[in-house]
Amino acid sequence: MFSENLKTLRKGKRLSQEELAIRLNVVRQTISKWEKGLSVPDADLLLRLAEVFEVSVSQLLGAQFEPEADENELSVIAEQLSRISEQLAVRNRRWRTVGKWVLIVLCAFVAFFLLLAIMGVALFSIRTVVGYTDVVVTPHTAMFANNAGAWYSG
């Protein structure tokens, strides 16, 4: 509700996110998060937003109130903000949990492939050393090579 209202009101006033951010003394990314529903402004910023858009806080939050209900307006707004904050907290906890598991799995894959790489280098080194010991030139084989095929048995 709030995120949609904010975006509609901002576009209705022909303000960019950057311009609104400057008026509220926040960064543009904060406005973007509000419009995406990833966070909500605190009470002070809600009041300033309502002033900028020349609407009541209840209209900004999307609630429709009767004119006589002004005395209960603050408690209803506080309740709505509480629900929104709770929903965001639950969503953030879920993302943190998912993020931790993704990081753990990613680290396990990296460790596994590093272990494979280390083992491969070690095996390659052993094969290379063994291979060189098979091709060691001895005086006997050197003499064979020098005699162009003649066998030297001396």
Image (cartoon, grey):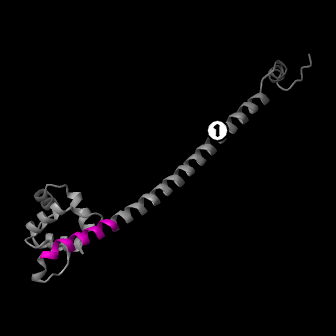
**Residue at horizontal 15%, vertical 64%?**
16
- Asked if 6 appears above or below 22 in the picture, the reply is below
**Residue at horizontal 25%, vertical 68%?**
81
In the image shown, does 38 or 142 lie closer to the viewer? 38
Please, what is the dominant secondary structure of the magenta stretch? helix
Q: Secondary structure at mark 1?
A: helix
Say if the magenta span includes residue 7.
Answer: no
Counting the numbered discs, the total is: 1
Name the outermost residue toward the right.
153
Label 1: few (<14), some (14–19) or many (≥20) C-alpha neighbours in 10 Å: few
Q: Quadrant of residue 136?
A: top right
Is residue 49 rendered to the left or right of residue 115? left
Q: Which residue is mark 1?
A: 121
Name the outermost residue toward the front.
71
Q: Quadrant of residue 24?
A: bottom left
Say if the magenta span includes residue 75.
Answer: yes
Q: Quadrant of the N terminus?
A: bottom left
Residue 142 placed where, x, y %? 80, 21
- Asked if 115 appears above or below 36 in the picture, the reply is above
Q: Quadrant of the C terminus?
A: top right
The answer to whether one can see residue 9 in this image is yes
The three-letter code of the residue at mark 1 reads Val
**Residue at horizontal 82%, vertical 18%?**
139
In the image shown, does 79 or 4 lie closer to the viewer? 79
The answer to whether one can see residue 37 in this image is no
Q: Which residues are magenta?
A: 71-86
**Residue at horizontal 14%, vertical 71%?**
57
